[in-house]
Amino acid sequence: MTRVAMAHESVLLREILDHFGPAHGLEVVGEVRRGADLGELCRRECPDVVLADPELEDGALQDHLTDVVAAGARVLVLADDHSPEQLTAILEGGASGYLLADCSPEELIQALLTVAAGEVLLDPKVAATILTQWRRLRASEVGVGTGRLALTPRERELLAEMAEGRSTKAIARALGISVKTVENHKIRIFDKLGVRTHAQAVSVAISHGLAVAPDGNGRA
């Protein structure tokens, strides 16, 4: 079973998970509404994934993500809306997915399974917001930087694919390279950006305009 913890005020969400979850191997193991209680819940119940609201009773979710990530849980945010600033803070904090609340129960279940399996998932509208922000940064001639932020054209291309929420296998197909090559590129990207997770890499890319795919179709 995939263990799910909830940090969300919606009673309907709990009813949806209790009704549809078991048939897909999902089990809700705990529920809190305060971020201050979320870390303890994760340490006690060891969930695979946390379904969270970006705004909890005692403040913003990102202020409590460190404890969740440290406990080994992955985080899927379910929100009514989003903003570039909120996205950056939440992804930088370690969340692995961001889904909008107008999704269907089936989409929610699949998103939880995807995030629990170690992939990153972004709602298409959220991905569009991120891409728009990158383009604005590109138009402002924000450079790719030097040193740890000096990505190769291939790494920038792969980072752009990551930011669109594509899985490792999907990126490999899109770029015409092997899954192993994608994983090797990701390791180098993480090292250059000084991050540990896929979501954190996307967040740094947003801040520095690094993930706009370069011109050309060169292959690694």
Image: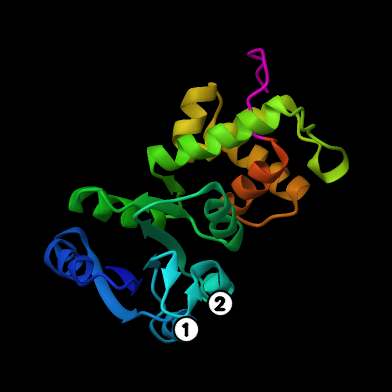
Provide residue 125's location: percent of width, then percent of height: 40, 39
40, above or below 143, in the image: below
Is any part of residue 165 visible from this angle?
no
Q: Which residues are magenta?
A: 211-220
Which kind of residue does numbered mark 2 sit on? Asp
Question: Looking at the image, what colour scheme do you see?
Answer: rainbow
In this figure, which residue is indicated by the disc labeled 1?
A: 43
Of residue 58 and residue 7, the one placed in the foreground of this image is 58
Give the quarter of the image for residue 15. bottom left
In magenta segment, residue 218: yes
Of residue 85 and residue 22, the one placed in the foreground of this image is 85
Give the quarter of the image for residue 57. bottom left
- Asked if labels 2 and 1 touch by Cβ distance under 8 angstroms, the answer is yes
- Numbered disc 2: secondary structure: helix
- Numbered disc 1: secondary structure: helix
- Image quarter where the C terminus lies is top right
Give the quarter of the image for residue 132. top right
Q: CA distance from mark 1 to mark 2?
A: 9 Å
Which kind of residue does numbered mark 1 sit on? Arg
- Image quarter where the N terminus lies is bottom left
Residue name at image x 56 percent, y 25 percent: 177
- Density class for disc 1 (Cα within 10 Å; few <14, some 14-19, many ≥20) is some
Task: Count the labels in the image.
Answer: 2
Q: Report the magenta stretch's main SS.
A: loop
Of residue 113 and residue 164, the one placed in the foreground of this image is 164
Provide residue 179's location: percent of width, then percent of height: 53, 35
In this figure, which residue is indicated by the disc labeled 2?
A: 67
